[in-house]
Amino acid sequence: MTAITRPRICPFCESSCGLLVTAEPDTGEITRIQGDPDHPASRGFLCAKSQGLRGLREDPDRVTRPLLRRGDDFIEIGWEEALDRAAQGLNRIRDRDGIAGLGIYLGNPGAHNAGVMLGMPALLGALPALMVSAASIDSFPRFLASLLMYGNQARIPVPDIERTDYFLIFGGNPLVSNGSMMGAPDMPRRIKALQARGGKLVVVDPRRTETAEVADQHLPVRPGSDALMLLAMIHTLFEENRIDPGRLAAMTRGLSELRELAGTYPPERVAPFTGVSAMEIRQLSRDFAGADSAVAYGRVGACCQPFGSLAIWLLDCLNILTGNLDREGGALFPAPAVPSFLMHLPFENGEAPYGRLRSRVSATPAIGPSFPTQVLWEEIETPGEGQIRGLITVAGNPALSNANAGRVIGALESLEFMVSVDYYINETTRHADLILPPADHLKRSEMTVIYNEWMVENVVAWSQPLLPKDGDERTDWEILTGLAARLSDMDRENFVTRHIEGFVDFLAPLLPRRPGGMSVDAMLGASEHHGEPDNLYDMLIRTGPRGDGYGGYPGGLTLDRLKASRSGLSLGPMAAERLPSALDTPDARIDLVPPVVSKDLARLEEALARGRFQPDQFLLINRRHSRSNNSWMHNIHALVKGPERCVAWLNPADAAELGLRDGDRLRIASRVGEIELPVALNDAMARRVVSVPHGWGHGDDRVRLRLASSRIGANVNMLSDDAEPDRPSGNAAFNGIPVSLSPASHP
Ligand SMILES: Nc1nc2c(c(=O)[nH]1)N[C@H]1C(S)=C(S)[C@@H](COP(=O)(O)OP(=O)(O)OC[C@H]3O[C@@H](n4cnc5c(=O)[nH]c(N)nc54)[C@H](O)[C@@H]3O)O[C@H]1N2
Ligand SMILES: Nc1nc2c(c(=O)[nH]1)N[C@H]1C(S)=C(S)[C@@H](COP(=O)(O)OP(=O)(O)OC[C@H]3O[C@@H](n4cnc5c(=O)[nH]c(N)nc54)[C@H](O)[C@@H]3O)O[C@H]1N2
Ligand code: SF4
Ligand SMILES: [Mo]
């Protein structure tokens, strides 16, 4: 048979590029992965990580049959037995301790997998256990600011990179990450185009990153001090009468309060702590306010740090005060065909869904139903009524990705029962009693269901499976709904139908084109030819804001239309002036000073008073690599080959003071742990800052990752301190961690 080539959404990062994947139908061998020139947003672009689709498929260590623990090892079992045993183990704890005895951890690749995104609500419906997700080690400050300021955590202001005159980045490195909370395939082209039309790119980052290297200006800020710098920028705007919110003025409340708050942060006061001079801060404010259009954007460096909520809130204020929110060339709110329905958290009685749930041990507030991950570990550790004894992990590797990893590993070890939905025996899943492995990516259909909400171009795409499943393989959707059905004592088919009915009702506000007189059953009937779970995608598309409403909106979107397009459909550029109608706050105004966040200024002041921002203190920051994806692509030869990557970067002057030469081993210690790894001297690093990549530390001899185990590296999250998260949101702080450095005594 001849090779087949099909378009495919890349599942590895938010850009969601279109790929063309070629396979030999007889052997299933992937012979080629190229960029798809017909994809409406990526237009042929792809990055190195895309090759992971082949590497993953060919990886002999990938788990393909369910595994059951036998002592220190696992044995293969059949799917029916595996799902039965999983349900029995969980039910045993639920029957004894109640639902409080169980927890669920959802990791990052789940958000890139429509089957997980649609299957999780089913699982949570059947098992409403305490839930944490990688969102709280990534973007909780962003979601919280959006929830409180605009009334909707999915209302993410996205840089209009195609039209802006001034792009100001705090703590993001899109040339390597390919853009985050700013899905933007082909970042190099977009940045070049920005500069070619006379626009400026300015990067605020403790390291002169790959993105800073091509920027028009780079300001090496002290880690963790972004909020101070932003307060001083806002101070300058008020002081120099550069406030001009334009049409936003009538939609905001709290302007005078913000002026008052910023009043105590003149640039001269904060400069010694930020490492950026008062003159530079003032000039930056002037440049920003003076540009025809401008956008301030912050990502992991601004967000995953002790003052992440303050920083993200103030970044939005900067956009609003200069009239750049919701205007072309500023920050815009995308209007996707398939809204991020999983993020739908309605207000109740005028109150934001924040802190309605509080955790048992530390009374930490949840955002909607989601707690920060550290809550899970303390709930597992702390005895008493409500202690968590059973856990499900789905597409996550908290043993490497969560703060204070030493504690996480201890908590995993102490569990009575654990189920992991994952295709690797890695640092986390090796603790499981059962591993339920999904079929590989190319055997499932795919649709972007979360990231549409923050793409710089409005597109919608669907991929058909490239290869058939072998015999008894299951997709994530089938595993999650199969488990949920068992936990509900129902057969899967009935369970899925009942679940979809409830789900569609819950989502009603996001499905404006749902025909009044048509039952969910009738809609499912009309979408039946697509099979499962594509029938659900079809329903969400057709009843969504761009849908055909099952006939009520002729010419509207359907899955059939999307399928016919092969590579996906463009719905045009992001639009301006979506406000005020896109505001979901009770008074339909932007809350410029949400108290939940602004009261955290007291903690910032306290940190200043305690001397936390001393310029001599070594601070740890993160680093990503173009061929790594968090913790889980280190077993793929094409992506891991080359020189050792898990090394600490240090400014040569600091290294000289410590008596370290390039390649020497360095010991890094924090309040919670210590690691050793080689040091590389790099003048791109600001003084007194050390950068270490995350996702390494594959030294556990019970993992089955033969290649990764030969390039162990160190687990940097042994150092990150779970007792010092961002407070309002609870998000982990991976950046700005105080550490001490010394030469390691032995090689
Ligand atoms: N190749 C690759 N791409 C990826 C990933 C990957 O692992 N590899 N991961 C994906 C994921 S899950 C995400 S969330 C995105 C993240 O996307 P980005 O946020 O764009 O990526 P990071 O490299 O984490 O960028 C954070 C930057 O913040 C800087 N920084 C650290 N501390 C501070 C600080 O206190 N203040 C300021 N202003 N800057 C600071 C760091 O030096 C770094 O350059 O990337 C995604 N894309
Ligand atoms: N120090 C430090 N720590 C960090 C960060 C940092 O910058 N610095 N970044 C943080 C960020 S932004 C993130 S998003 C987190 C990520 O943290 P996690 O989500 O906890 O971890 P990942 O490394 O993404 O692990 C993903 C797991 O999912 C599995 N997997 C992959 N694809 C699929 C699939 O389709 N289905 C299923 N069922 N499983 C799948 C993989 O085998 C792997 O076990 O890490 C965070 N940790
Ligand atoms: S940038 Fe790379 S990893 Fe991200 S979606 Fe595109 S090809 Fe995949
Ligand atoms: Mo992330």
Image (cartoon, rainbow, N blue to C red):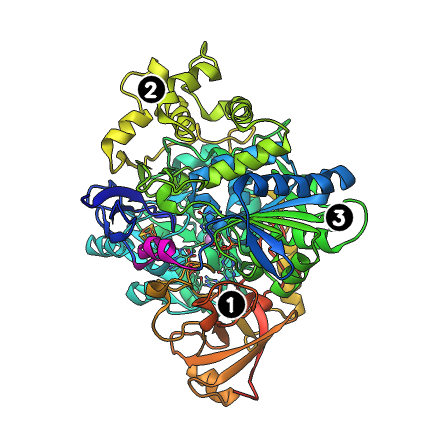
Kind of residue sitting beneath label 3: Gln
- The location of residue 414, given as percent across then percent down, is 71, 57
The numbered mark, 1 or 2, whose residue comes first in the sequence reads: 2
Does residue 350 appear in this view? yes
Helix, strand or loop status at disc 1: loop
Q: What residue sits 45% from the left and 67% below the top?
A: 706
Kind of residue sitting beneath label 1: His
Q: What residue sits 73% from the left and 56% below the top?
A: 381
Most foreground residue, 618 or 463: 463
User: Which span of residues is magenta-colored?
Assistant: 48-60
**Magenta stretch, overall SS:** helix
Residue placed farthest to the bottom in the image?
Answer: 659
- The location of residue 609, given as percent across then percent down, is 66, 66
Q: Does the magenta stretch include residue 55?
A: yes
- The location of residue 720, given as percent across then percent down, is 59, 65
Measure the C-alpha gap from mark 1 to mark 2: 49 Å
Report the disc number at residue 387. Answer: 3
Q: What residue sits 64% from the left and 36% below the top?
A: 127
- The location of residue 112, given as percent across then percent down, is 42, 45
Most foreground residue, 451 or 491: 491
Residue behind mark 1: 698
